[in-house]
Amino acid sequence: MDQKEIIKVLNDNLVRELEATMIYSRNSFIMEECDASRVTEAISVDEMRHMWWLADLITKRGGKPTMEHQELDFGGDDLEGMLKRQIELESEGIETYTRQIREIPDEEVVGVLKHILDEEKRHRKEFRERLEKYVR
C-alpha cells in the first residue's frame, strides 16, 4: 500500500468518524434516558478526537482531509433504534480498523488505528450495556 492509498484509507476513516460524531451528537439531543444520552454525547466527543488524529495523519502524508459524507442514518427516534445503530457503527469501525491494522505498512498510522480500535471496542460495550439496561 503506497502513500496515496494510505491517504485514501485515512480519509475514508475520517468520514466514518465524522458521520459517527454527527449521528451520536444528534441522538444525544433527543434521547429521553439521561444516562444513555450522556454516554452518547461523551462518545461523540471521542469520535471527534479520532477525526483530529486521522486528519493529522493525512496532512503529514501530504493529503487533505475530506468531509464529504453520505446521508446519515440515525437509527430512528426511539432509544432502542438509536442504540442499535450506534452499536452497528462501532462494530463496522472495529472490523475496518482490525483489517487495516494488518494491511497498512506505516507504523505511525497503525499505532493510531490501534488506539482508535481500543476506544471503538469500549464504545460498543458502553452502547450495548445501555441497550440491555434501558430497552426491554
Image (cartoon, rainbow, N blue to C red):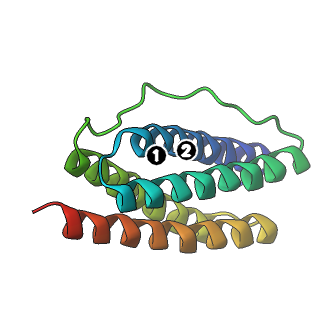
Locate residue 59, reporting x and y percent. Answer: 87, 44
Q: Nearer the viewer, residue 129 or 93?
A: 129
- State the residue at coordinates (61%, 58%): 46
What is the secondary structure assignment of the residue under circle 1?
helix
Amino acid identity at mark 2 = Thr
Residue in view at x 25 percent, y 35 percent:
76
Quarter of the C terminus within the rendering: bottom left
Seen as rendered, the residue at the extreme left is 136
Is 49 rendered above or below residue 132?
Answer: above
Identify the residue position indicated by label 1 in the image: 24
Left-right relation of 78 to 94: left
- The quarter of the displayed image where residue 29 is located: top left
Residue 128: x percent and y percent?
Answer: 30, 67
At 43% across and 25% down in the image, what residue appears?
Answer: 71
Q: Are marks 1 and 2 in contact (CB under 8 Å)?
A: yes
Q: Position of residue 37 (x, y in %)?
A: 40, 53
Q: Residues within 10 Å of mark 1 (few under 14, many from 20)?
A: many
Q: Position of residue 19 (x, y in %)?
A: 52, 39
In the image, 85 versus 99, the foreground residue is 85
Disc 2 crowd rating (10 Å Cα; few below 14, some 14-19, many 20+) is many
| Up/down of 131 relative to 125, above or below | above
Residue 63 appears in which quarter of the rendering? top right
Could you tell me which quadrant the N terminus lies in?
A: bottom right
Residue type, numbered disc 1? Tyr
Q: Which residue is mark 2?
A: 21
Q: How many marks?
A: 2
